[in-house]
């Protein structure tokens, strides 16, 4: 299996080098580009023989910030997936990041394993979102942004599973879904796990992305 080539743009050298060192420890990942601002990142990508598969992008950087850099990269290199790794978690920042061409958004409080998971998922599915993004907000972002999620069109869902998905996208809990479908909470949890397995995603937000793409929500 080919390693996922990762670029990191971060203006604090200690954070930049620390991330590189940690991610290099994962056999699926290969850190190929390190930059302390957006312009430096663009220059390094342009000069390299192989493009990164994914970029961890800081937002606050000198010379060229994360928003400016993402806009340029999404236009020149649309195949590169961009995950913002920032301390800004306000919904307005998330929306702007995705609308400019970002494919995911993580807080700098994220654990290393989640960053690893995000890099793998974004290259596999074309997106990575945390549960802190509401499903209503997600629908707005996906219908207006450049993100093109990857899902197998041959996936077969039962009518009951589709009902579950539509209720999930209304931000219902398993218990609330169980009440509406006249099933037990344990059965509702079983539906959730089964749908996650069918779609090949790890979080409920992945189910919502599928729903938006396939006009279920």
Image (tube, rainbow, N blue to C red):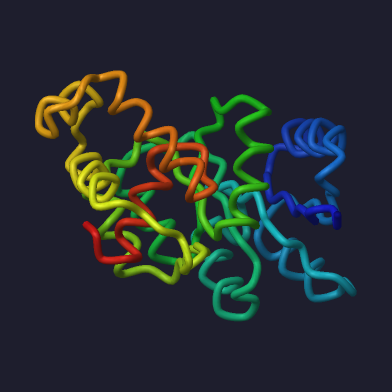
Q: Residue at x 55, y 64 (%)?
A: 70
Total number of numbered labels?
0
Left or right: 128 with respect to 161?
A: right
Closer-to-camera residue (81/216): 216
Which residue is pictured at 67% across the width and 28% down the height?
A: 112
Left or right: 112, with 17 as reference point: left
Going by the image, does 141 lie left or right of 150?
Answer: left
Quadrant containing the N terminus in the rendered view: bottom right
Q: Residue at point 38% right, 49% down?
A: 94
Coordinates of residue 161 in the picture (x, y in percent): 29, 45
Q: Compared with residue 111, is residue 31 higher up or lower down, i.e. above or below?
A: below
* Closest to the observer, 193 or 4: 193
Q: Going by the picture, which residue comes out furthest to the bottom? A: 76
Q: Height in image: 157 above or below 175?
A: below
x and y percent of residue 56 in the render?
Answer: 65, 49
Q: Is residue 165 left or right of residue 44?
A: left
Q: Residue at x 72, y 68 (%)?
A: 42
Q: Nearer the viewer, residue 2 or 153?
A: 153
| Residue 100 place in picture, x, y as percent | 44, 66
Nearer to us in this view, 11 or 77: 77
Give the percent coordinates (x, y) of residue 82. Answer: 59, 57
Quarter of the figure that contains the C terminus: bottom left
């Amino acid at each position: 299996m080919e390693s996922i080539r990762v670029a990191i743009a971060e203006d604090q050298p200690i954070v930049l080098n620390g991330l590189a060192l940690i991610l290099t420890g994962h056999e699926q990942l290969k850190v190929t580009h390190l930059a302390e601002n957006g312009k430096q990142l663009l220059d390094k990508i342009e000069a390299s023989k192989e493009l990164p598969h994914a970029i961890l992008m800081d937002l606050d950087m000198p010379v060229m910030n994360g928003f400016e850099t993402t806009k340029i990269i999404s236009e020149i290199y649309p195949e590169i997936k961009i995950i913002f790794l920032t301390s800004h978690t306000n919904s307005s920042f998330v929306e702007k990041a995705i609308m400019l061409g970002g494919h995911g958004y993580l807080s700098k409080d994220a654990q290393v394993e989640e960053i690893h998971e995000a890099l793998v998922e974004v290259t596999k599915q074309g997106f990575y979102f945390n549960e802190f993004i509401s499903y209503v907000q997600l629908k707005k972002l996906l219908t207006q942004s450049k993100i093109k999620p990857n899902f197998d069109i041959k996936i077969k869902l039962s009518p009951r599973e589709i009902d579950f998905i539509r209720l999930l996208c209304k931000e219902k809990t398993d218990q609330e879904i169980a009440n509406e479908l006249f099933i037990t909470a344990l059965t509702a949890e079983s539906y959730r796990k089964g749908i996650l397995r069918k779609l090949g995603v790890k979080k409920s937000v992945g189910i919502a992305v599928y729903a938006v793409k396939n006009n279920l929500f």
